Amino acid sequence: MTGRAAEALPNAQEYTVSELSMSLKRTVEDVFGHVRVRGEISGFRGPHSSGHCYFALKDDSAKIEAVIWKGVHGRMRFKPQEGLEVIATGKLTTYPGSSKYQIVIEALEPAGVGALMALMEERKRKLAAEGLFDEARKQLLPWLPEVIGVVTSPTGAVIRDILHRLEDRFPRRVLVWPVRVQGEGSAEQIAAAIRGFNALEDGGDIPRPDLLIVARGGGSLEDLWSFNEEIVVRAAADSMIPLISAVGHETDVTLIDFAADKRAPTPTAAAEMAVPVRAELFVEVASLARRAMLCWQRAQDSRRGELRAAARALPRPDALLDIPRQRLDRAGSQLPRALRANAHVYERQLSAIGGRLTVTTLRLQIERAHEKVTRLAADAERCARLHIQQRDTRLRYVGQLLNALSYKGVLQRGFALVRDDAGQPLHTAAHVGSGQRLSIEFADGRIAATADGEAPPAKPKPASAKPAAKRATDFGVKKTQGDLF
């Protein structure tokens, strides 16, 4: 047998390693295609730096490698976690690089209620550690909200129960934000509705609610799982509007119940928490009004009695004025004698002062006053002389400055000032007409002249003439006189 097998080997088809690997890959993918595998996640350490997830699915006696591509992982509502039992749906294939087969997972779901409960407890511990469930974060519900926002499905019985209960107790304005309450994308819609209500501005076209109710009817743990998602819990914890969680029946517990400001066992109970009973308020207000009136009446009776007792204890008005009237009469009788005594006192003081005013005293006072006036006159003369000197010095300085800036200083250097018959200075030859009467002022006087002929054309100045022109304007005098000869 061994010999015959060895003789047949040369006739067998020869494969390369890559060809054999690809053949096995096609065989596995064709035979199995899409499969559902139940197992425990093992070796999961979070997404790889590339965004892909690599781990294994195992049971008591076997293990299979698994991979979730980055795009699929981002769309998954249920994310893989270490040690969680799941049902994975995907495509069986091989990895030629390491000669092993693996499953490429396209969908992932927990295997049974136990897995969901374990995941829920793990998520609850994580969010509680962040402080999202602390009592210090809870807000008080408004006693009578004007506007109530409801996040729920618009087609279910929940919204009808809430509206009917509000109508029976105390009708309020209700804004409904319709969302899906289970299935793919429901968690994102619920979180967006909570954040959307909080984003409304006070006084806008759409009124901002004073209270939010997130409601859903009863169901299984899988049906209520959207309210256990982290995005919903964080939105409820971040809400600045007081929020009531009314998800499921009284025995149903979701993570949003811990993050909400108040948990209601049912949607109907949430409506009862939101508003008081109007009829009971009427009765209570009427009772308080009666009690206030009775208290007021008792207080008035008590004050009336106190006033009567005080009136009996007070003296008569005439008796109150007896003593002041007596004092007035006594003071009136003493007034003439007091005036005479006061006049005598001032007369004695005047006599004493007059006795001290002798001729010698007056002469001394006059001499002191004369000395003081003489001293003040000397000071005034000295100050006036100093002031005149300062003014004289300033006047001379201003005169020198005026002479330096005067055009007559320019005339002293050989220049002349030409005026027309009206006495206005002429700056250019173009302004002088033939036969025009002119007045030419020199440093030592003026002469009259008559213009003869037209002004000659202006000649270009040589380069050497530029410094002279600059010197002519050194003192701010611009040379504008033309040559008349």
Image: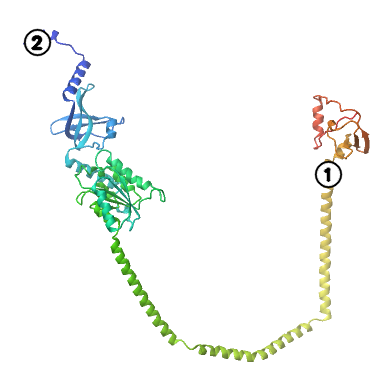
- From the top left corner, tell me how far across and down residue 273 is, in percent: 28, 56
The answer to whether residue 353 is seen in the rendering is: yes
Disc 2 versus disc 1: nearer the observer: 1
Determine crowd level at label 1: few under 14, some 14-19, many 20+ residues with C-alpha closer than 10 A: few
Q: Secondary structure at mark 1?
A: helix
Q: Identity of the amino acid at label 2? A: Ala
Determine crowd level at label 2: few under 14, some 14-19, many 20+ residues with C-alpha closer than 10 A: few
- From the top left corner, tell me how far across and down residue 326 is, in percent: 57, 91
Q: Which residue occupies 20% across, 31% down?
A: 89
- From the top left corner, tell me how far across and down residue 411 is, in percent: 88, 37
The quadrant of the picture occupied by the N terminus is top left
Q: Residue furthest left?
A: 1
Vertical relation: 403 (above or below) 18: below
| 26 vs 470, nearest the viewer | 26
Left or right relative to 11: residue 176: right
Q: Which residue is mark 2?
A: 5
The quadrant of the picture occupied by the C terminus is top right
Q: Which mark is residue 238?
A: none
Q: Which residue is mark 1?
A: 402
